[in-house]
Amino acid sequence: MGILYGMVARGLVVLAEFSSIAQTNANTVARQILDKIPRGNEDSNSSYSHDRYIFHVKRTDDLTVLCMADDSTGRRIPFEFLEDIHQRFVKTYGRAIHTSAPYAMNEEFSRIMSQQMDHFSNDPNADRLNRLQGEMSHVSLIASQSNGF
Ligand SMILES: *[C@@H]1O[C@H](CO)[C@@H](O)[C@H](O)[C@H]1NC(C)=O
């Protein structure tokens, strides 16, 4: 299944998010995690489990990049995804990140997250099982798009 949900936030302000599955409360859980992350300037990498999913969170300065993956995906691929998303976001939006309104980048950047989620869920370095699961997540992505989500 791989990576199923991604979000970029400044503090508690969500700037962009994307979910590849239709039936999920990932966005609600992600907001609860944003609330839990200690304020301050400490950078951190952390993971929280919720049912059979793991939320991986990378905080750099005030920017939080978060994703949800199923537990069989492990930690390496989700954190590579978070690093990639962080770099793309900072490179694309620069200083606008510090002042932008909620969801300001959502329309454009949710598409980028969708592509990168698909890419990392099909990581050629992942083991065979992860590859098969990546292919299945592609199928559910197409299915959820037809639901208009
Ligand atoms: C978080 O992980 C990155 C690699 O993705 C590493 O460079 C960084 O030092 C880590 N930060 C902390 C606070 O552990």
Image (cartoon, helix red, strand yellow):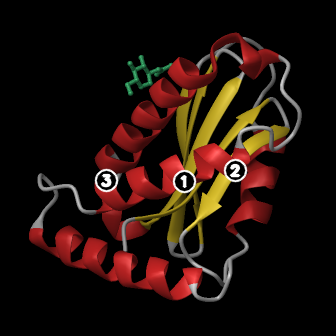
- The residue indicated by pointer 2 is 107
Q: Nearer the viewer, mark 3 or mark 1?
A: 1
What residue appears at the point 73 percent right and 36 percent down from the top-left corner? 9
- The residue indicated by pointer 3 is 120
| N-term-proximal mark, 3 vs 1 | 1
65 or 17, which is in the foreground?
17
Query: Is 75 displayed left or right of 8 in the figure?
Result: left
What residue appears at the point 89 percent right and 33 percent down from the top-left corner? 101
Quadrant containing the N terminus in the rendered view: bottom left
* Circles 2 and 1 in contact, beta carbons < 8 Å: yes
| N-term-proximal mark, 3 vs 2 | 2
Query: Is 78 displayed left or right of 66 in the figure?
Result: left
Q: Secondary structure at mark 2?
A: helix
* Circles 3 and 2 in contact, beta carbons < 8 Å: no
Identify whether 53 is placed above or below 44. Answer: below
Q: Within 8 Å of ligand 1, the CB of disc 1?
A: no
2 or 118, which is in the foreground?
118
- Type of amino acid under label 2: Glu
Quadrant containing the C terminus in the rendered view: bottom right
Quadrant of picture, ligand 1? top left
For the residues labelled 3 and 1, the Cα–Cα distance comes to 14 Å
73 or 48, which is in the foreground?
73
30 or 115, which is in the foreground?
115
For the residues labelled 3 and 2, the Cα–Cα distance comes to 21 Å
Q: Within 8 Å of ligand 1, the CB of disc 3?
A: no
- Type of amino acid under label 3: Phe
Identify whether 131 is placed above or below 11. Answer: below
Q: Position of residue 68 (x, y in %)?
A: 54, 59
What residue appears at the point 74 percent right and 48 percent down from the top-left corner? 33
Classed neighbour count for the residue bearing mark 2: other residues with Cα under 10 Å, few (<14), some (14–19), many (≥20): few
- The residue indicated by pointer 1 is 111
